[in-house]
Amino acid sequence: MKVVIPAAGQGVRFFPATKSQPKEMLPVLDRPVIQYVVEDAVASGADDILIITGRSKRAIEDHFDVSPELQKWGQLPELQSLDELSKRVSLHYIRQREPRGLADAVGIARRHVGTEYFGVLLGDTINVCTPPLLHQLWAIAQLHRSSVIAVESVPVEKVRDYGIVTGREIEPGLYQCEELLEKPDPASTPSRLGITGAYVFSPDIFLAIDRTPPGRNGEVQLTDAIQLLTQEHTVLATTFRGTRYDIGDRFLWLRTNLEFAYRHPEYKGRLRDIMVSLMRDDTVPQ
């Protein structure tokens, strides 16, 4: 399976931390976000991954490359596991030369994926699922021979932060997409099915991207391209088993770090003690 990981965003919401560092390289507990994404793709069966990067993203390539200066530390389990991951998959990189939106980034993969179905995972989202999320989507795509997007129910106040899907439920948790709206006003749609950033596409998506006009901020929106795709091909949306962690802003990144640390046997007790102490201090009158 070929997988495309768009990782060209500028990380504006993390400035100044991401002024010269890719947001995909921000750590969650003990590894950068992009490593979780690659691990998820490999666990789903990917043997070929194309990462779409941009300016100031060289650190992503370096992370998965051999580091001669670290050879003396090569026996460290953390470095060994990263090296083994890199050997299990063919990693490729190409730049999005201008920030023209997510659909444009996916479109860059056209020659790489050719006429095959392919997966897409965002470079700033961690999915903890059993089986892996992309594996779940791939099974549906192969069964129905259609593109599939992952969705989850979002609170009404979050609707304007998502691409929203409306459609007919054909099986429990499986919908045939009818209308997709990019960050709509909640009053304009009854649906609460938010697109989470994991997809399996047929190569027909590239023709839809070609016909998609620029939207907000002059960017070509992937949600708009999928809407065009539904006019000629079946596109399915599915809920999934597991949890998605969005690392899109400072608070979400911090919350993810806290949750991951709290589940880690080495850090759980120490973190709990700190949080209890902080909450106790917060209740003491100043």
Image: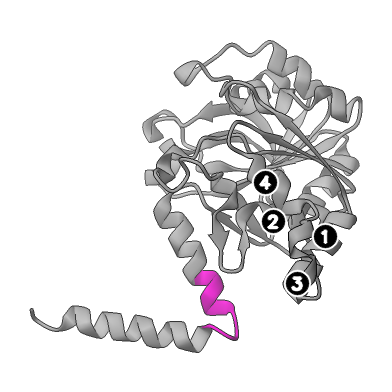
To which quarter of the image does residue 44 belong?
bottom right
| Residue 43 - label | none
Asked if residue 207 lies in the magenta stretch, the reply is no
**In the image, 209: left or right of 201?**
left
| Residue 85 - label | 1
| Residue under numbered circle 3 | 73
Residues at circles 1 and 2 in contact by the CB criterion of under 8 Å: yes
Please state which amino acid type lies under the numbered disc 3.
Trp
Q: Is residue 241 placed above or below 46 in the rendered structure?
A: below
Q: Earlier in the sequence, mark 3 or mark 1?
A: 3
Q: Earlier in the sequence, mark 2 or mark 3?
A: 2
Q: Earlier in the sequence, mark 3 or mark 4?
A: 4
Describe the element under mark 1 as helix, strand or loop: helix
| Residue under numbered circle 4 | 60
Residues at circles 1 and 4 in contact by the CB criterion of under 8 Å: no
Q: CA distance from mark 3 to mark 1?
A: 17 Å
Name the spot of residue 286 as percent of width and height, x first.
8, 79
